[in-house]
Amino acid sequence: MELHDLVQSSWQSLLRTRGRSILTMLGIVIGIAAVILALSIGESATLFILSQISSFGSDKLIIHPGTKALTQLQSSSAFVDDTLTYTDYKRLRREPYVDAITAEVVQSDMVKAGSVNKSISVMGIMPDDLTIMGLSMSDGQFFSDADVEGRTRVAVLGISLADEMFGQGNAVGRSFKLGTLSYKVVGVLKQAGTQFFQNLDDIAYLPATTLLDAYNKKFFNAFIVKTRLPLDEATSRLEIAMREAHNIDNPTGDYSKDDFFIMTQADAIKTVSSITSILQILLSAIAAISLLVGGIGIMNIMFVSVTERISEIGLRKSLGASYQDILRQFLSEATMLTIGGGIIGFLAGSFLAWLAIQIINQYQRGWVFVISWNGALLGFVVSTLIGIIFGYLPARRAARLSPIEALRHE
């Protein structure tokens, strides 16, 4: 049988039982759509995370508490002791290669201002944060070193939070409460958007020392250092300075002896890439289970189809159709079903991924819709293989039927 005739015959056979054909394809459609959805959202998430890390800048270092794990991920251990103090901050700020440094500590609390009463993120930072994060003022001024030293109860607000609390242009000079303590607004930042996974426009910023006092904290979450030196050299110098500050005897640079670790942008990208790759493999494996279920469904439906068409098979074999002709006929039908399901699944998965990205952007801007072409290729190849593999047994059964027994079948 010629290829054109084979395709036409298979297509006509599927059209005669279009209801069953649609139900047969449904498992493949769901499976391929799940693969495309999972991989596309995974790639979008990877791009978003990498863009956030890139926006941090390649001339900065982050000092975290805890011991640097000697693994490929270069991450901190699961349980760490807080070790970064205000004394450490002042020590590092005196280093000649440190152009700017900020200490960060984060807290959540209820803010009260007029009719506004809601939970917000509060961040304790230092004056150099403006330079490090590339921020600028919309109104008023940023707090000063004197505010940090004096632990003054002043605040700078993100522009969205300021407008919500006091109305546009009315925040500077006003007071509000965080928990039970009052703070005076001295400035409002210009719109900054999302940086490093935080919406900077919806945060209240306090001098870091003020926040430590207000919430009975002693340690910072991290130091961020901006330097003019090559990052490798700056990292080495910072490690020496921190070991001296913490009285750590570690002349060989054994990270397991340190109670801090330093990350660069490259380290963060490496960590994120490793984690997202593992997650995408996991998501793909879970979604692939749907393809397996769809393949089993195709095999069952094809067995039913063989049983219903025994008389037709007997007639064709009595008219000269060979074993190979019957085998190719049923394999062709199974393959057409899976390829058709693959195409529909790709379109459905792409639409669902696009819709998911639009929804995510309503809550966190910066996500970009991308189609996972690796997922599309995987889906096409897998759906075709499923058609061949799961369609083979029913096709083989049909091809091996005796023409006489098939014609006698009712």
Image (cartoon, rainbow, N blue to C red):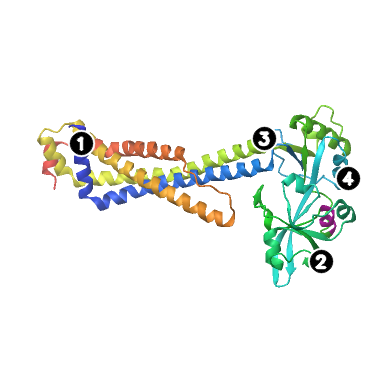
The answer to whether marks 1 and 4 mark residues whose Cβ atoms lie closer than 8 Å is no
Q: Quadrant of residue 147?
A: bottom right
Q: Element type at marker 2?
A: strand
Front residue (pair 227, 258): 227
Residue ID for mark 1:
6
* Front label number (1 vs 3): 3
* Front label number (2 vs 1): 2
Query: Of callouts 1 and 3, which one flags the residue occurring earlier in the amino acid sequence?
Result: 1
Q: Element type at marker 1?
A: helix
The span picked out in magenta is: 208-213
- Whether residue 405 appears in this view of the structure is no
Whole-number angstrom distance, CA of label 3 to CA of label 2: 41 Å
Residue ID for mark 3:
266
Residue ID for mark 2:
182
Q: Element type at marker 4?
A: helix
Front residue (pair 78, 270): 270
Name the spot of residue 130 as percent of width and height, x first: 76, 49
Q: Residue type at mark 1: give it.
A: Leu
Whole-number angstrom distance, CA of label 1 to CA of label 4: 81 Å
Task: Say whether residue 121 is left or right of residue 372.
Answer: right
Name the spot of residue 377 as percent of width and height, x first: 41, 37
Residue ID for mark 4:
87
Q: Residues within 10 Å of mark 3 (few under 14, many from 20)?
A: few
The answer to whether marks 4 and 2 mark residues whose Cβ atoms lie closer than 8 Å is no
